[in-house]
Image (spheres, coloured by chain):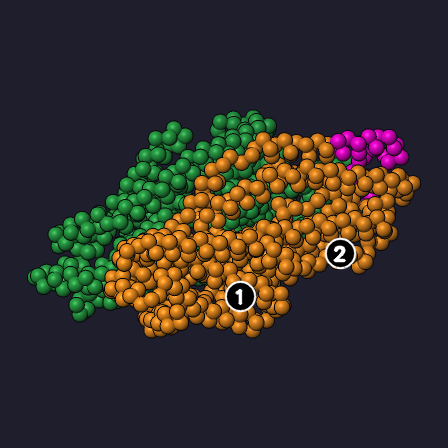
Chain colours: A green, B orange
Amino acid sequence: MWHITKREIYDNLNSLRFALTTVLLLALMVTNAVKHLREHPKRVQRYQDAVTESLNHLTDRANDSLYTLAQYGPGNFYKKPSPLHFCANGGEFLLPDAVEVDEPPVFMTDSEGNRLLEGIWSLSYPDANLHNKDVGPNVSQVDWAFIIGSILSLIALWFTFDAFSGEREQGTLRLMLANSIPRHTVLIGKFLGALLSISIPFALAVLVNLLLISTADTVYLTTEAWGRLGIIFALALLYTSLFVALGLLVSARVQQSAVSLMILLLMWVTLVVFMPSTLASIASSFSPAMSFDEFWKQRNPIKEDLWDKYKEGLWSSELDDSKLRAKSEFYTENAEREERWQEEQLKYRTSQVHRARAITSISPATLLQHLIESFAGTGFERHLQFAENVQRYTRQLREFVADTDRADPESLHILGVREGMSKKLVNPAAVPKFEDTLNLSKDFNTTAMELLLLTLFVLVLLSGAYLAFVRVEV
Amino acid sequence: MMTLIRRELLDNLMTFRFAAAVFITLLLVVAMTAVLLKDYEQRLASYNTAVKTHQRQLQEGKTYSVAKLSVDRPPNPLSLFNIGLDKRLGNAIRVYHGHVPTLWDAEMHGSDNIFLNLFTSIDLVFIFELVLSFLALIFAYDAIAGEHERGTLRLTLTHPVGRGHILLAKYIGAMLCLLVPFLMSLLLTVILLTTSTAISLSFSDFLRISGIVFSSVAYLSVFYFIGLLISVIARRTSTALMLAMFVWGFLVLVYPSMARTIINLQESPQTRTASAFNEIKQMWEEFDRERKQFFANNPGLGKDMSFLGIMRGGYTVEHVEEDSSILQYYYRIGLHVGKLKEKFEPQVPHIQNYYRFLGLQTISTAERAWLVRERALEDIFVRPANIEKILLKLSPVGVYDAATQAWIGTDLDGICDFFTKARQYRQTVIDYFYDKEAFGDRKWFSADKGAVDWSALPQFSFQRSDVAINAKRALPDVCLLLMLNVALFIITFLIFVKSEV
């Protein structure tokens, strides 16, 4: 078997396609690296500026008073750009990069514009980027997901379409089988040979890419990032072996190499190009999106009954305990409902996307795309994780405000109303700060299913290739 | 010659690859059309909802100054051939007398789940780009190399036929074969389109479709010639097949993405943006100063510029719309007085005067800002996009894509037509306001004596550009494709003539 593998590799190393593949992959990977080196520092800079501004807001408010902190909350939250953005951009330019903190609503003003009733802050999730300023032509960006998903799979087919049909045409297959080599050995030899000879130029290209990226002083990769890159490389090999197996399967069954190439290409177009987009649009048409207007209509009733509930408390300007308490409850509940409504809207849209993603997972190309996105820390799942991080932090911050207030014996402990809260100074350093983090083990958990599916795909195709080759007449 | 063509035709028709080609194209195209039709129907429904919403919003504006007038861009019915920029760019634009609307101010009418844009969308032309070119190469790779290997080429040349004739016969025979799956699938698409209730195709639409067909045939033959060239050079079928596939992958998949990425490396003209934005901002700041001066010079207006104190019920709108990345900066000023307090009645003529002054000032400032903005936007967005487009045209895929988009009107020019129309409509609305003397009218800011009647307002209507204009826009690209054909034929011929058999 080892002998066959070696023969295959030597055969391939000397061929034209090996040279062309190397050049092609190198060119793509270098483009990718250069693009990342140009864009990533800007992205990080933008993020840091935004975060600094948002932290300043938080400190200012904490310095002012506990009430200001409780009323205005923190500044906006920003999504940390992933250092592995070059692996998969994951449609990041379509996704919002922030969760916003809404200004406290003003419920009532007097004729001079003084605010009589003003509520407290709440979170809002901005919609996807509406302003698309880009008027250039539509083409996919060169990231690893594209290079692996589209190009490498094509190369895998390119290396295997004539594996058996070519040898049959030349008559060498018969010769080989005349020796006492079992057929499965031949198959595994061919499989390993093709896989290894594709990995060589790919590994070379990846090496050049990473060398360019890691030697630049503008981009810094942590140990964890290297681990993630290792996983992505392994995924690439798994995905390539899928297409190698597919190529062997078709090549074993079909007599002519040209026909085999044609069938493989049809399969490639269906799996890689056709299915991801078409299935998504079919899936999304099953459950039409709820329009913004409909959501808006749902929002108003839940707010109006709040007014009725707390009517007496709100209209008076007296400062006694029960009135203040009514105000506080009204504010808190108002903010909570607003937030819940926003969350529901996000959830509704998310579930629709999830459904579409689940259906498109029939295609291995989409599986790979999702896997690379999760390990690169970009894309839709990452966006949801960011929103979750923000939600966790806001709970923490609200608890902090309540605890600080409770620690002050002079306070009335009525949150959200100036008169009811502690007037002691707040130490800005003690206020919890938001940090957007990624968690590798969590990524593994969310992707376990997809990983399993991809592996299953490979196994099925490999056994299919085996069956096809064993039964074929030479 | 006829015999040669007949032989080629029969040779090709009997092969398995011909059957497979027909099957592949039909399957993909029909499935694609069904899905795209569904998508178009959804977009059309979303457009209709948006139009209704905007009409309601207009009626809700009780005074001229707070009215919200928006117009919508309908989806292009032929966009399922080539979606182009139709789905990606904004399709709802607010028409406001104080701002000249452009493509970059537009919004998406918000009834869809925008997260779904994360999934790539493809169209029929993309399928043609991939499949037709590949089929052409598959038919061509062994045309010469195969005969060379089998020795039949030598045999044919012993007869008194010119080498050019052989090439031509091969070309005609294969092209006729390739046209069968293409035309069949296209026919099915058109049948599906005409049976759909959402789309009604006019005569000019059929002309546009035939434009696409013509461009597709030219594209197909470019790739056939590329295959023929490879076949002549390679001489061995296995090498030819290998090379053909590489060329296909490179031209169709790799090059477009790589070219776009490389071009994107160009620095966006930061200084240009900043200077133009500042210029526009200064114009509006000057506007603000003049407004304040006018206010100060007319003591009859009272002290409060927002006029909140004079009314019971109502609101005021006064803010700056600002987005430096698209050079957007303008004032939006409006007032809705629900009920005027009695004692402020003498102030009304002064306020009318103030708003008459403000209306004229707003319009003239907007026009001046537009002069700066138009040129700057052209420099910042349109020119780089055009450079990208030209660079993409180094591959026949880019030329074909641009040609079909131009035919359908989903290219940048086609989309811009709509916004030109929206700008004209803004002018119409302003003229209407002048006719009604709306700027100095009480109803400009107050609804206490009845709301504005919007029924006489001229309606907005958008017709896609004439097919002749589409043809004119597509002409350069179609010519480019034809020239490419001729050039490739000449090169192939020269090499073939010089080659030993």
Q: Position of residue B293 (x, y in %)?
A: 82, 30
Rounded to the nearest whole Å, what is the CA distance between mark 1 and mark 2?
33 Å
* Residue at x-position 61% and y-position 41%: B378
Check if mark 1 and mark 2 are on a common chain.
yes
Whether residue B301 can be seen here: yes
Whether residue A442 can be seen here: no
Mark 1, secondary structure of its residue = helix
Q: Can you tell which mark lies on residue B352?
A: none
Q: Which residue is mark 2?
A: B59
Based on the displayed image, in which of its 4 quarters is residue B244 positioned?
A: bottom left
Cβ–Cβ under 8 Å for marks 1 and 2: no
Query: Which quadrant of the figure contains the N terminus of chain B?
Result: bottom left
Q: Nearer the viewer, residue B83 or A375?
A: B83
Q: Which residues are magenta?
A: B286-315
Residue B312 lies in the magenta stretch: yes
For the residue carrying disc 1, how many other residues have a C-alpha within 10 Å: few (<14), some (14-19), or many (20+)?
many
Q: Which residue is mark 1?
A: B37
